[in-house]
Amino acid sequence: MTDVIAAARAANRTILSEVEAKQLLADAGINVTETRLATSIDEAAAHAAELGYPVALKVVSDKITHKTDVGGVELGVANEDELRAACERIHERVIDAVPDAEAQGVSVQPMAEPGAEVILGITQDQQFGPVLMFGLGGVFVEVLKDVAFRIVPLQPRDASEMIREIQGFPLLEGFRGQPAANLEAIESMLLQLSEFAEANPEIAELDLNPVFARPDGAIAVDARILLTSNS
Amino acid sequence: MAVTRERLTRALAPKVVAVIGDKQASGYNWLRSMKEFDGPVYSVQVDENEIPGIEELGIPNYKSLTDIPDQVDFAVCAVPRQVAPFIVQGCVEANVGGVTLFTSGFAETGEEIGVELQNKIFEIADPAGLALIGPNCMGLHVPGLGVRFNRDQPAGVQGNIGFVSQSGTHGMNFSLTGAAHGLYCSTLVSFGNGIILEAADYLEYLADDPQTEVIGMYIEGARDGQRLFRTLREVAAKKPVIIWKGGQTEGGGRAIRSHTASLASDQAIWEAMIKQVGAVAVHNLDEMIDVVKATLLTKRTQGNRLGLIAMTGGQSVVLTDAFEKAGWKVPTLSDESYAQLSEFFNIIGGSYRNPLDAAGTIGQDPKHLDTIFDILNADENIDAVGMELSATFMARRWQDKPEEFDRLIGSLKRFMSESDKPFLAALHPSHVEEAALTARKRLQEEGIATFPSFERAANALRKASALAAV
């Protein structure tokens, strides 16, 4: 599983692509949507046929951090005709926004069944080493900064407490008729992530954002990993 | 080489003490501070001009540590920084248990020479296993043995609070202000740069120290954060730990790509760490004093429902506000309680819903206070009891009629011994600060947790109860 990291190091990169990040996470047993790299439209169509429609398509480029901002994302692509058109649109918009994007292709992944959006993350603290974060996704993390931290390694009680510590916790318990999120699934993902952080000290930053927290489990639909700049 | 527990114990609970390099210019502060030490104190000074002044204090002086005809357990070193490595070498040769380096001007200056000297000291002390405290610190205060670094610190009193401070000032202030609140340390260490022994070492010692019932810590940063984290997790499982984190470490200045990294401020991480290990965070000296006091003097509750006794209607209202803002509930009492209260409670200018506005009722007959306490003790809706002691109305009266104050204290202590419910008192100094302070001192001597405001009382009980949940 360190092949992904070794490859990035060899290419002198510290940012892993979504495909690479998810491969690393999947190898560690963390539930992510299966995501494959396609370097041509035909390949994208073949992946989509295997993974099953509808799919999401995202541009893959070392130069692009915020894929949505440059028009590099198409969601809910329902069939092959739509997929071919969507790939063309992504290509045009990205070339337009980032002429030197040097995109490797697009990632193809099945559209996950939505749930409450949460964020799980890792960062390195100067004094304490790896640290885990949990919060509600979207506006809650970006504007309200409603998040909880714990130092790695986490004990089961830490995972349970950090979920309940955030202000927005009632939203996960099934607020106003929304289905309740499976809290045990989030807890296990936090504990897996704690082990993942311990096993991979080269990971400087990680965002699983969003993770869909559903009644039947939790799945990360996007992942971003940044490696440490030294070594 | 790690410092052994035996060596650390010699240093922190010494039988023989030496002070190296004290001088007239500092008013012989170190030697004078050791005046109450429970054992022999020696001076080491080579300056012929300083020696007569030292001998006038009645303290035998020697030219070198190795000349002292006694095994020194603990030394204080107050020499210039260039000389410090030689003194540390002398401590190693004389098999001193441990030494406090008050001397500063090392790595904390950022100067090359300071860093070099500090490294030199480390190279001498570390292989020898010398229990070196500091440098750049005030060192050790053990009131039970009369070890002090400031002459106002208490001596001859056995305390029960372990305190670890990265700062000399905050360590000193805790010992002085704490003593004014009747709170005394078992062992207090100000460890400064902590090049040999750091916070985790002292925490481990205090966790095992039978005299220490509660541990407070002032800290700005940790050299080995993971060790501190793991140590705190173990220590806080044994004893209540209260942590005051000062300052904000600046970020590494690297480019941040993720939401997680952008939100991980120094403060957020420390607060999380403190929660995670089962300690509680406080944010200033007063709060440290309050929470230590509540932890030591009040019983614990897992509940959050308070019965409140106030002296006026207006205070009933704001007393409730203060406690509810701190997360407490002030519920209605049981029907049975109301039935009993209605039999004697004076409702002209008073009320007994909860809070109980009770001045008139108690004034009528002081025995009524005992009855009120009995009712609150039996009431299943109530987990803890708070009471306003009004200095405004009573402090001068307590001075004129001490028997009334004695009677009040008797009632409080009776409740505290008969009930499992926590009790705490608020005594605002009002316009009679001196009289109120006298009253507070007496209450503290009687073991009654007293706070200068409702807000501080409410916060202290909440944080002490959070510790109890560990």
Image (spheres, grey):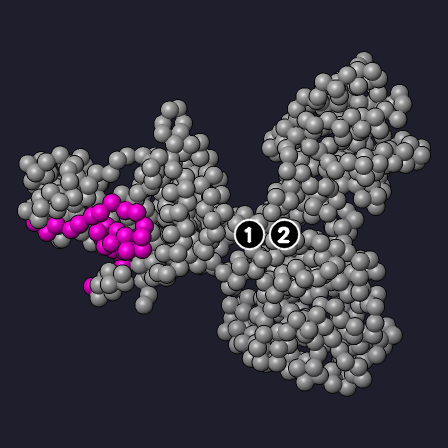
Q: Earlier in the sequence, mark 2 or mark 1?
A: 2
Q: Amino acid at mark 1?
A: Val
Q: Above or below — where is B227 with respect to A131?
A: below
* Nearer to the camera, A215 or B162: A215
Image location of residue B156, percent across then percent down: 84, 60
**Which of the two residues, A135 or B451, is positioned nearer the viewer here?**
A135
Q: Residue at x 81, y 84 (%)?
A: B69
Residue at the image point whose x is 79% and y is 15% from the top: B342
Q: Does residue A13 show up magenta in the picture?
A: yes
Q: Which residues are magenta?
A: A11-40
Mark 1 surroundings: few (<14), some (14-19) or many (≥20) residues within 10 A:
many
Is the N terminus of chain A in the top left, top right, bottom left or bottom right quadrant? bottom left
Q: Report the residue marked by disc 1.
A: B277
Residue depicted at x 80% and y 22%: B358
Query: SS class of the residue under badge 2?
Result: strand
Chain letter, disc 1 residue: B
Amino acid at dot 2: Val
Pointer 2 with pointer 1, Cβ within 8 A: yes
- On the question of residue B113 being in view, the answer is no
Up/down of A65 relative to B11, above or below = above
A32 with respect to B167 (left or right): left
Identified at 53% across, 57% down, the residue is B229
* Residue A78 seen anywhere in this rendered image of the structure: yes
Q: Please state the horizontal and vertical placement of residue B236, each as a whole percent of the image.
A: 61, 53
Q: CA distance from mark 2 to mark 1?
A: 9 Å
Taking the view exactly as shown, the residue that stands out farthest to the top is B348
Q: Label 2: few (<14), some or many (≥20) within 10 Å?
A: many
Q: Quadrant of residue B59?
A: bottom right
Residue labelled with disc 2: B241
Same chain, labels 2 and 1: yes
